[in-house]
Image (cartoon, rainbow, N blue to C red):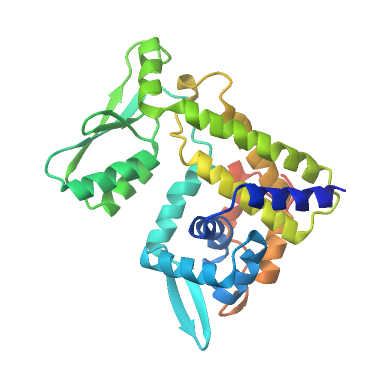
Amino acid sequence: MNSRFISRWVEDFLAERPVRANSLIITIYGDSIAAHGGTVWLGSFIRLVAPLGLNDRMVRTSVFRLAKEKWLSAQQIGRKSYYSLTALGRRRFEHAYRRIYDDPRIEWDGDWQIVLTGSNIPPTRKDALRKELLWEGFGIIAPGVLAHPSANNDSLMDILEDSGVKDKVVVMQARTFGALSSRPLQDLVHDCWGLEAIAEDYLRFVERFRPLLRAIKATRALAPEQGFLARTLLMHDYRRVQLRDPQLPQQLLATNWPGTAARQICRDLYGLTQRAAEQHLMTVLETADGPLPEPSPYFYTRFGGTLAKDGQRS
């Protein structure tokens, strides 16, 4: 019964929310393939994603585009093509998945990171920098002034380096005076980050995935392919919502912030599907050296190190 429910849930999800090939491939490379070395034979990857509605032509077109955008690189060995994450692609994934697997909402002491962009940056480069910083969770508090109350310093430096503006911007730290949850501060957060839309997305995520969590909890033995499909759609949808979340400290959020429940569901489902999903990846995917290698040790540190090597929650 639960197996049929899971299959129907996957079918309904794909029917209601058709996935974009480029975005889904990024999700799979970042979540599933990066930890296994980052390189797979294209033919095996096409087999892997077929149940998600991606056919041969769609995959080949998408990986070609992702290679042009420097996410992936291709290598031809005989008649087979192997696609690998580029160094830039790995850094992009690290930025994104650091926010997903690690919970950055530590206790906030009132510090802010401020980035000042001057007139010495070409408009196109400044616009690209602004988009990268917004993606990292910064808010525009005034023209040429972006701020975040708990940004990751390493991610910020990587963004400035990759954007070629490290020597053209001013990065400062500031500290909040007075109460860390004052009304003016709440108004600033409301004006700069638009949390209402993000909260609604989190609520939809919770409503969508909670029934799947119940079904998988009640399943004695989750089929490998079902585990992979469930985990992939979980991370694809969570990534879409979570990467729009500026990751503000708890003091600046409502007490019933729905992102907390969404993260709990994501973490629990990830742990429950881990064993089956990894088994399916190891069975289907191939590299130039043969079967997919075992995941790197860092894989098991995801979600606070709550994953165990036997696929059970630790």
113 vs 24, nearest the viewer: 24
Farthest residue, direction left = 120
Q: Nearer the viewer, residue 48 or 175?
A: 48
Tell me which corner region of the image, top left, top right, bottom left or bottom right, holds residue 238: top right
Q: In the visual, does 55 lie left or right of 6?
A: left
The answer to whether residue 275 shows anywhere in this view is yes
Residue at left 45%, top 21%? 252
Q: Is residue 117 left or right of residue 280?
A: left
Q: Give x and y (percent) for residue 227.
A: 72, 55
Residue furthest to the front = 15
Residue at x 39%, y 41% (from the top left corner): 136
Above/below status of 175 relative to 294: above
Residue 224, how many percent across, how many down? 75, 60
Q: Residue at image x 71%, y 64%?
A: 280
Residue 116's spot in the image, x, y percent? 21, 35
Q: Is residue 106 visible?
A: no
**160 up-or-down from 105: above or below:** below
* Position of residue 147 in the picture relative to residue 261 (left or right): left
Quadrant placement of the C terminus: top right
| Residue 74 image-quadrant placement | bottom left
Residue at image coords 46%, 27%: 195
Q: Say above or below: 192 vs 137.
A: above
Q: Is residue 240 left or right of residue 265?
A: left
In this picture, is 14 found above or below 66? above
- Seen as rendered, the residue at the extreme bottom is 78
Q: How many marks?
A: 0
Q: Give coordinates of residue 130: x percent, y percent.
A: 29, 41
